[in-house]
Amino acid sequence: MSKFILLMLKNLGRNKLRTTLTALAVTVLVTICVVVLSVVATVRMQLSTEASQAKLIVTERWVAPSEVPVRYIPRLTRIRGVEDWTTWNLYVGFFDKTLRSDRAGLGFATRVENLTRMHGGLENVDPAVIEALKNEKSGVLMGSTLMQAMNWKVGQQFTFFSTSTAGKDLRFKIVGVMPAGVYPLSFFFRDDYFAEGTGNKDTVSLVWLRLRDASLAPRVISQIQHDFASSQPALKVETESSGVARFVEKGKVILFIIDFVALILSIDMVILLSNSISISTRERRVEMAVLKVLGFQPLHIVAMVVGEAMLIGALSGLAGAALAWGASALAQSGRLPSDGITSFLLVFPVPAQAMMWGALAGASIGFVGSVFPAWSARKVKVSDVFSRIA
Amino acid sequence: MTTTWPTWLTWVLVGLLPLWGLVLLKYLVDIRSVPVSYNYRSLIVRWKTTLMTALGFTLVVFGLVLMLAFINGITAVCRQSGEPENVIVLSKGAADEVLSSLPRDTISALEHIRDEKGVAGSRILASREMFLNANRFNPQTQDYTALQLRGVQPIVFEVHTAVRVIKGRTLRAGQSEVMIGRTVETGQNLHVGDTFELGRKRWRVCGVFDAQGSALESEVWCDLSELASQFKREGSYSTVVLRTPSAASAQRIAESLASNRQMNVEAYTEPQYYAKQAEQMETLQLAAWVIAWFMGTGAVFGVMTTMFAAIGQRIKDIAVMRIMGFQARAILFSFLIEAALISLVGGALGSGFGYLINGLSQNANLGSRTVEFSFQVDSWIVVSCLVFSILMGIVGGLLPAISAMRIKPLEALR
C-alpha cells in the first residue's frame, strides 16, 4: 500500500506544473466555496438547534413593529411549562450623527439576570462581563463585528442616535464583547435603562419564553392563543425555529443564489480536475501499458488514477479551507478592514472543522472527477500502444 | 427597403472587444501571423479538452449572470419606484417608512408648506400615510404571511399619479376595504371580492391597482383612519408625501426640509428615497464580483492546464512554424487567441444559459418591505460577462503562450 501511495506521489511530481495548476484551481475554488457556504450554514444552523424548538417568540399578532403590553407578561410567564422568560425592545439608530448606513445599528434592551441563559451563543460570556452589566446601568454588550467596524475598546462610551424612538438618544458604556459570530452587528443593554431613557415602560417589542421541554410547545402555543384571543392587541406566538424560518424565507432568493453558486463551484472543480486528469492519462498511455506488462491489473490502474486525483483534491481542499479559515479569523480579530466585502462574506466565522470538510470535499471531487478518465485508462490495450511506438 | 442593425448584435460585438484588441495588436506588431484557422482546427481536434475547459468558463459566467441579474432586477424596481415630483418626509434619522413616526404638529406644518421659488399660486398636495407590516393568517397553509399595509386618504391618488385601478374600484373612506397591488393579487392569491381577517375585522378587497412596476404594487392600501383605529396607532403617521408641481420644486423642498432644524425631519425626493433603499445592493454587487473573480481565477488555472498540455503536444508543430519563418511574437499571439477562443465559447454559452432566467419573477426584501422583482439580464450584463470571460481566457493563456514563444526550433525537432 505504501509503495502504491509512493507511486502516486511520484506520478504527481512528474508534471509539477500541471499538478500545481490543478491544485491552485481547486484551492481557490474551495476557498470561495467555504466562505460562501459559511454564510448560509450559519443561518441554517439557527433553524436546526434543539433549543430553538423549546423557545417561543410572542409578538403582537397583526402588525409590525410589534408592541406587546407589559401588563401581559405576568400572565404569559405563569403558564405551565414556561421555565424562563425575557423581553426585547428593539432600539434602532446610528452610532454617530452622520446617519450613514455603515454607522447604523440595532440594540436589544433585555433582562440582564438571565441574558446568557436566554440567548443561544452567549452561554460562555465571561460572568464578570455580566456582573459589570448588572453594575453599570448604561452598560452594553457589543457584537464583535460592530466593535471592529467602530474600532472601539471595552470601556469606551458612545451616544446612540435613535430612530425608533426619535429624540430619545442614549449614552452607553461598553462593558464587554460577544463571541465572534453571535449577534455580530447588534448590542444588548439593560431593559430598565431603556424604559428610563425612552419613557417606554408600557410595551415591549417581543417576549421570549423558554419551555422545560420542546414537546410542550404545541400546548403552550395553543393556550396563549386561547387566553389572549379576545385581548387588544391580540398575540402571535411561534417557536423560535419557525420565527427564524419565516425571517429566512424573506431572504430565500439570496440563499438560493448562494447555494446555486456553491453548486456551480463544485461542478467547476469536478470539471477542472477531470480535465487535468484526462490530459494526464492520455499522455501516460505508454506508462499504463508498461504497468500492465509488469502485472498491474486494470483495477490497479483505476485505483492509481483515482487515488492521484483524490490526493490532489484532498490536499487542495485542505489548503483552500485553511485559507478561508485564516481569512475569517483575521476578519473576526479585526485585522482585515470590516467594511465592504468583509462585512458580507466574512461576517460569520469559518469554523476550524471546515478544514476537515474541505479535505473531504476535495477528495470527493477528486473521486468524481477522475472516474471517467480512470475508466478509460483502464481500457488501455498493451498491443495497441506498443504497435504505435513500433 | 432598409434593414435595421440589431442592438443585441452591437452589444455582442462590444463584448468581444478584448478579442478584437488582441487580433488588432497581432496585426499591428506582426504582419505575417499564424492563421486563426490553425488555432480553430487545433481546438476541434482536441474537442473534448476544449469543451471541458470552455465548460469551466460557462459555469463561471452563468453564476455571474445569475448574481448580476438578481441585483439588476431589484435595482430596476427601485428605479421604477417614485415620482420625481414627490417628496417623501420621514421622522429624523429614519431611513425606512416602518421606523418613521411623525408627530401631529409636524404634519400640520408640512401641509402648509410652500415652494418660495416656485411658480406663484402653484399648489402642493400633502398625503398623510401610515405604513405597517401586517401578519395575515392564511387558513389554507395555517401560517402567517406578510402584508404591507398603507393607510391612505383620498388625496393619495392625486399624489401617487402612477397608480391606476385595473380591477374593481377605489377605496371608500371609513369602510373596511382594501385595494391591493398587482403583485399582491398573484402572490397572495387575493382577488376582488375576497375577504380576509386582519385585527378584529374582516377586510374586503375592492380593487387591484397597477403602479408601473414600482414597489407600491407589493402593498395593500386601506383607509388611514380605519387602519389607525384598528391597530391603536391613532395620531401617528409614518410619512407625508408632498406632490409638487415639478421635479425641481421637489428637489428644492426636499433640501429645505432636510436642513430645517425646527421641522426635524428627513426629506427625500421619491427617486432618492428608493435609491437609498437600493444601497444594500451595492454590497451584494461587490460580493458577486468578488465571487466571480475567485471563480474566474479557478478557470484561469484550468485554461493554463489545457494550454500547457496543448503546447506540450505541439512542440514540433511550433518548431516547424518557426523554421517556416513565423516570428516568436506570432506564436505568442496565436496561442493567446486560442485561449481567448476557448473562453469566448464558454462565456457565450454561459451568457446564453444565463439569459434563460431573464424575466423570472421572485420576491425579495428591500429594507423592511418585500417587493416582487424579475431577474433582468440586460446588454450590460452580457457585455461585462463576455469581457470578463475573454479577459480571464487571455490571462490564462498568457504564460503558456510565452512558453510556446520561447521554444527553440532545432532543439524541439531533435
Image: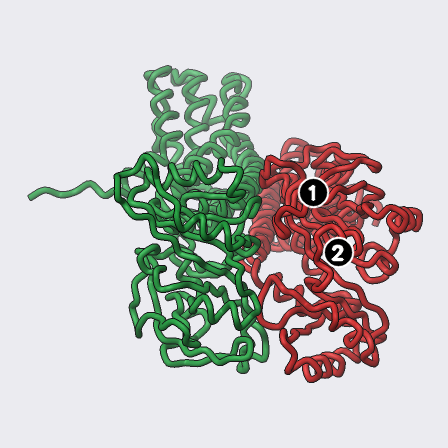
Chain colours: A red, B green
Q: Which residue is mark 1?
A: A160
In the drawing, what numbered circle is on residue B59?
A: none
Identify the residue at image location x=74%, y=48%: A187
Residue B52 visible in this rendered orientation of the protein: no
The answer to which of A63 and A239 lies nearer the viewer is A63
Of B376 and A19, nearer the camera is B376
Residue A314: percent from left, percent from top: 73, 47
Which residue is labeled 2 in the image? A195
Neighbour tally class for label 2: few under 14, some 14-19, many 20 plus, Cα within 10 Å: some
Chain bearing tag 1 is A
Question: In this rendering, would A216 be left or right of B190?
Answer: right
Give, as a three-letter code, the residue at label 2.
Ala
Question: Residue A78: x, y in percent?
Answer: 82, 77
Q: Please identify the quadrant where the N terminus of chain B is shown.
A: top left
Q: Nearer the viewer, mark 2 or mark 1?
A: 2
Q: Are marks 2 and 1 on the same chain?
A: yes
Q: Position of residue A228 (x, y in %)?
A: 68, 80
Q: Secondary structure at mark 1?
A: strand
Q: Quadrant of residue A277?
A: top right
Question: Which quadrant is the C terminus of chain B positioned in?
Answer: top right
Against A273, residue A243 (above or below) is below
Question: Going 76% across and 43% down the picture, which residue do you hit?
Answer: A144
Q: Earlier in the sequence, mark 2 or mark 1?
A: 1
Q: Is residue B408 above or below residue B111?
A: above
| Residue found 50% across the figure and 49% down from its top | B90
- Label 2: chain letter: A
Alpha-carbon span between mark 2 and mark 1 = 15 Å
Labels 2 & 1 near each other (Cβ < 8 A): no
Left-right relation of A34 to A110:
left
The foreground one among A385 and B377 is: B377
Q: Between B17 and A103, which is closer to the camera in this rendering?
A: A103
Q: Quadrant of residue A49?
A: bottom right
